[in-house]
Image (spheres, rainbow, N blue to C red):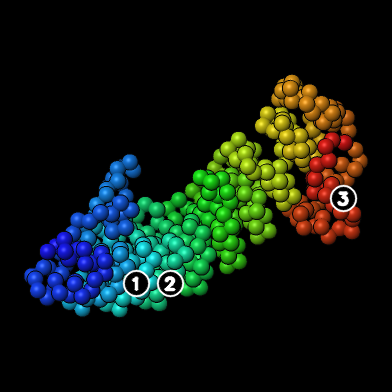
Amino acid sequence: MKSEFLSALRRNDAAKVDEILRTSNLDIDTVFEVEDRSSTLASYKQGSWLHSFKLEHSWAMGIHICMMHNAKESALVLLERGAAVNRKPNGKTPLHVACAVSDADCVALLLNWGAKVNSVSLSGHTPLHYCTTQESVDCARQLIFQGADVNNPSQNNDKDTPLHIAACNGISELVGLYIAHGANVNAFNALMETPLITAAFWAMDARVQTYSEKHHLVCRMLLDYGANPNLQDGDQKTALHKASWNCDQTLMQILLNAGADPKIVDMSGNPALQYTPNMMQMRPYCEPRRCLQLVLNYGAVRVYPKQFYQLLEIYHDDPRTVELMANSCGHLTNTPKLMDAIPKETYKKHRMFYDSLVASCTTPRSLQHLARFAIRTAMCCSCESGVKQLPLAQSMKQYILLEPDGIIH
């Protein structure tokens, strides 16, 4: 009888479900063991299982199974006959499951029958925390209309608010919905990350090595609604540090335009600029030169002349980046380590450029360069926008903004 009842629930055969309940003594809240490889039905406390160990079956009542299989008609039969709506046989209520599968109709049904809108799963999540897809926006809307708390952090080690979850997944509609209903855009989780920092970090998909326009949009929205771009996480990193780590030029531009300070240093004493060179080997698809040029034009601290050789050790094969960094300084200092940082093969390949670099270390820079340096020093953080307003030829504006031309004067 149990297997027949379970089969009827899965295929949403409401008539059969009703018949079985009328003609048998089967408990309507009977707990079944069902296949659940994706853990849709299950929730566990953090640390309960090893990461490498995954359960393939979960416990669930009939109402949970209806939610998993979008069986609204069968669910209604169960509810009308008194099925419990807030039990958690495997850590989740039926409402948690309905949100996890993004079924707005089932969410509405459960709420009408008394489901607790802020119930917490065994892993510490409310139904809003399980709204993680584009299709779950209507679910979240119904939860909020019934009193769901948009600022309720998860009751676990993460302390993520629903806004953190939406930002992590790049769901702009959820972000807008939560903010419209009072979500704190500067809320901190357990790692002291704001939703903006979270979105900035997840804006790059490391698996496919691409940047996410969805996350960029979320960052724009958060900033438009008052997110502070200069708040720091537990490691003292800002959203700009995260974007620089990803070599995400588009997001760096968004953050800098919104007032991100490139001079802020993290726990290790590194400004955002420091992470772009460090990531060059890991992000071969990006353009680190453009990222460096961007933060320098917004007032980032320049490379200390006597430490310039360290930059050469990383960028010796990219003369344009070396030129960019050299021209951000008023002068360079010739040290024994400078030429040692340039491999012989690289020097032969770019001999004209590196001869000009060495010459710039031993002779005064041109008046044109010194004038550029004076303008950039005066404009400081507003160099990017300020230069564009000057009555100069476009080529001269590009020169001031450190666009390389292949040789150092």
Residue 307 in sight: no
Eyeballing the image, is 155 above or below 12? above
Callout 2 amino acid: Asp
* Left or right: residue 238 compared with residue 324: left
The disc placed on residue 247 is none
Q: Residue at x 66, y 48 (%)?
A: 263
What residue did someone put label 1 on?
A: 107
Q: Residue at x 47, y 73 (%)?
A: 181
Of residue 229 and residue 7, the one placed in the foreground of this image is: 7
Q: How busy is the neighbourhood of tag 3: few (under 14 within 10 Å), some, or many (20 plus)?
A: few
Q: Earlier in the sequence, mark 1 or mark 3?
A: 1
Residue 113 in sight: yes
Quadrant in the picture for the N terminus: bottom left
The residues bearing labels 2 and 3 have C-alpha atoms spaced at a distance of 51 Å
Where disc 2 sits, the SS reads helix
The quadrant where residue 256 appears = bottom right
What residue did someone put label 2 on?
A: 138
